[in-house]
Amino acid sequence: MGLTFSFQFYDLPLQHPFQISRYTVTVQKTAIVCISDGIHFGYGEATVNPYYHSTQERLKESFIKIQALVEAASGLHPEELWKNIEPILKNDYFALCAFDIAYWDFYARKNNKPLRSYWSDEEAITPLTSYTIGIDSIEKMQQKILEKPWPIYKIKLGTSNDIEIVESLRKITDSVFRIDVNCAWNAEQTIKNSNILRDLNVEFIEQPLKADDSEGMKKVKSESYLPIIADESCQRETDVSICCELFHGINIKLMKCGGITPALRMIKAAREEGLLLMAGCMTESTIGISGLTQIASLLDYLDADGALLLSQDIASGVTFDFGNIVYSNSFGTGAKLYT
């Protein structure tokens, strides 16, 4: 029986306006891909994101380009199909990611296996996920923490009063903080701030400098009082070898690298280089998060809170209990669209 490949766009309203150093989002637009043989279904997701030039129009064009090839691919291993699809979508890795997760999900369900079982023990220990606090007034950031008790918070910074924000948030919780600057600091600021933040129970700093500031990052890596994790500087597989000279670790995002297939190779390469390993999400639904968490046991850190930031989800699947992943009992990723 042949496959069908379909896609649909959704608007995901957020609980709170989500602000980082570059922009603010109140409704996240996303695309859901479905691959099916009429009995088994697999789902993947790609969000619209201005920084990475991901638009609805571009995603639609990409999906139409690969539809016939995917529908003729029944029986192919996901790694083989990814190799066939990547040259067609080499300029749209968000679409490549949505396809790849959907096909892995379909493949695992058809073989009656949880997806994560292909590379790890189903009962393997997984890191806790952080919960993100977007930029806002100090009072509102404090309120978000009080509303959502959590063991680890990722604090978005990139304002004129960043240290004051962290000091104020520290007064109301003993939870671990991770700082994400989204390229808003320079080298001197980062080194100075890392010394202060170390005493405020901050675990690491994510992407403090612009992605093209290699000289600044060399200085920061050698002088920072905290580990520095690459995000915007680590997009594709080829970035891993570059990042080991500039960062202590990398944040792998499936949409940036093109899905689970290349992420597994990036994890292997990063481990060989002795890098700390994190995987993160966009603000996506439980479809995307259920795919992301399949690689969690291979990581040191996890940021998989995208669906927790929504006021209304479109799917069921993986859930979280005070940071702990609770996997679905279903095969594949366990994700299922609400009808």
Image (spheres, rainbow, N blue to C red):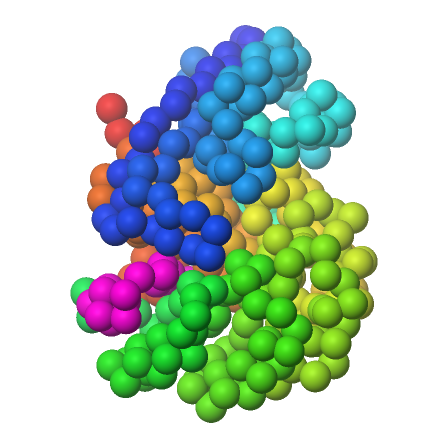
Identify whether 85 is placed above or below 104: above
Image position of 287 (left or right of 264): left
Query: Where residue 258 sits in the image (x, y, percent)?
Result: 63, 38
In the rendered image, is residue 134 in sight? yes
Which quadrant of the figure has residue 314? Answer: top left
Q: Quadrant of the N terminus?
A: top right
In the rendered image, is residue 125 in sight? no
Identify whether 268 is placed above or below 97: below
In percent of the image, x 76 and y 63: which residue is there?
214
In percent of the image, x 25 and y 81: which residue is there?
172
Query: Where residue 57 sits in the image (x, y, percent)?
Result: 51, 19
Query: Where residue 187 sits in the image (x, y, percent)?
Result: 66, 73
Q: Quadrant of the C terminus?
A: top left
In percent of the image, x 54 and y 32: which residue is there?
54
* Front-lying residue, 300 or 193: 193
* Front-lying residue, 329 or 89: 89
Image position of 295 (left or right of 148): right
Identify whether 34 is placed above or below 141: above
Q: Which residues are magenta?
A: 128-145
Identify whether 138 is placed above or below 71: below
Which quadrant of the figure has residue 243? Answer: bottom right
Image position of 278 (left or right of 239): left
Magenta span has 28? no
In percent of the image, x 47 and y 16: which residue is there?
6
Query: Where residue 222 sits in the image (x, y, percent)?
Result: 74, 81
Which quadrant of the figure has residue 84? Answer: top right
* Front-lying residue, 195 or 290: 195
Magenta span has 129? yes
